[in-house]
Amino acid sequence: MTTYVPDIDTAEPAPQVRRSPARKVLTNPLGLASLIVILLITALGLLAPILSSHDPNFASLKEVNAPVGTPGYLLGADGSGRDILARVLASINVSMISAVIGAGVAVILGTVFGLISGYVGKRTDAATSWVFNLMMTFPSLVLVIILFPVTGGSYQITIAIFGLFLAPGIFRLVRNLVVGVRNELYVDAARVAGLPARRILSRHIFYVIRGPIIIATAFMAGAAINVQAGLAFLGLGSNRVPSFGAMTADAFLNIYAQPLQILWPSLFLALLTGSFVLLGNAYRDALATGGVNKVRRRRLQPAPTDPDHTPSLTQRDSEPSLLHVSNLRVGYPQADGRVKPVVQGISFDVAPGEVVGLVGESGSGKTQTAFAVLGLLPSDAQIQADAMVLADESLVGPGAKSIRRLRGGVVSYIPQEPMSNLDPSFTVGSQLVEGLTAGGSRQEAKATVLELLARVGIPDPARTFRSYPHQISGGMAQRVLIAGAIASRPKLLIADEPTTALDVTVQAEILDLLRDLQAEYGMAILLVTHNFGVVADLCDRVMVMSSGRIVETGDVRAIFHAPQDPYTRSLLNAILDEDTPRIRATTADHPKETQS
């Protein structure tokens, strides 16, 4: 069969390459300067043994309040005769360790529990939110000071306790961000692909929300440095540990005799905390601006064709139903306590190798039915069924198996909006490979994906593999999703309006592709659509759905030639054709046969 590539694929605009926020920070003068300052100060701290000739706690009575430039004392000596340069370099290390501990404890605890709470929801969300909200009511600095004797004077333990009280802020930030993205279509697509929850959280959710977390980390690092310095300024800490706060307190004692001594700890403390804040602001600006650079336009080549290739036909086996659903009911609780039903006791079967169309207008409940089978309905949905059996595995009742075990290998899903179901943060190839790496090496998975991309009619599989979703057209994106859906050779393919968002030419190609793949792999297909033309072109049997109920079911030809239910007749009479703009349901009982 010849593969035709539409104009939208061969004459698309110049592709764009995404610039990461980190690279944009480096091109921002403010961000680059802040990063350089942090790296230089950190390097000074690490080189302290080389740059300083004295121990930071070594005191010489001969050098008390030595001025700047004294031999061996480049920045002078303090009121106790200690080398100010050595103490500044040692204080840098103390400050950076405080930043890592304080921000690290807060970010790790807040992020981990925020991801779990926002993704799992319900009781887990309520319990973790209650604990972290309770922690926010505690006066953190007061408790840190009260618990100071328990720490034995260790600034590391003190800052770790402070980080514990910073964690609720990160938790609330992460939890709310996760709630906002957990129902995105590309997350649903990852669930259907059979990815475990930890993989979805770490790759598809955390990767998307990482920006605000990085910004908050920068601010919390500065806060931890300031808190450690403030406690040392108050005398809470070991006098053997150099600190900018302790140096500032000592300088105050000599502010009239040697006012320059207060400059050095104040300067380095301001540079460190200010640089962290400015770096966070630069990263925020990088996330807020567009992140693409235009590159040279490249025209796609036509897909190679094989005139001798004929798809192998698979005979439908006379075996029990692949999918059996009995008395399925789906409802949603309302504010007044009532439950609004959206699917009202429907029953149907899909046989192996059969293509069944589920037709109805918007709001009829057809997508809710498909999502109930896939296990993708929201957590507040109330789902009941007398029986729901997929590939001899019961999904409801005693001994029911989790649908997660069957996603990918037994049932796959083609979504309605191709561009919304691809994660914009990753290349097309990495998303397809992700679902195949569990059973083999990444190299084998990549080779399989490239073969699938070629099989679904993508002209340049290697280029598409390297592209981001925004660099391909809608038709190519739908082909990518089809390739991902058939990668595991599922027994049942659920397609939810797979051609709605595409132009007419691409629609026809996608239907041809689905027909060929179904015949080649012997898959059963449950096609959710409102388009009777698609049903006539692809389906063996059709179920007509209205207001959450199946009003009519039967062979496609029988339904088209002699519909029994008035609702079915009204849907058929609403079809537009080339000869008649619209046939009124009240005047025609037998619609003209639709041509696919």
Image (cartoon, rainbow, N blue to C red):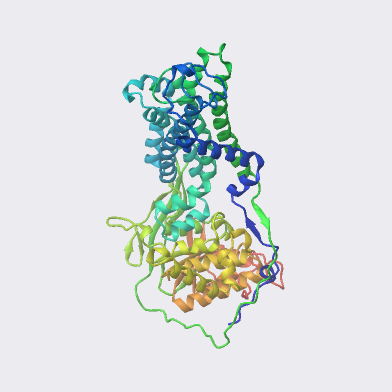
The image position of residue 401, as x and y in percent, is: 32, 58
The image position of residue 280, as x and y in percent, is: 57, 38
Is residue 557 or residue 483 the one in the foreground?
A: 483
**Quarter-of-image position of residue 67:** top right
Q: Quadrant of the N terminus?
A: bottom right
Residue plotted at (51% across, 20% down): 248
Residue plotted at (51% across, 72% down): 452
Q: Quadrant of the C terminus?
A: bottom right
Q: Is residue 114 visible?
A: yes
Q: Is residue 313 above or below residue 523?
A: below
Relative placement, left or right, of 323 versus 209 is left
Q: Is residue 354 above or below residue 66?
A: below
The image position of residue 391, as x and y in percent, is: 35, 67
Residue plotted at (58% across, 37% down): 37
Is residue 432 or residue 529 the one in the foreground?
A: 432
Q: Is residue 44 above or below residue 357?
A: above
Q: Is residue 537 visible?
A: no
The image position of residue 393, as x and y in percent, is: 32, 63
Furthest residue toward top = 256
Relative placement, left or right, of 108 versus 44 is left
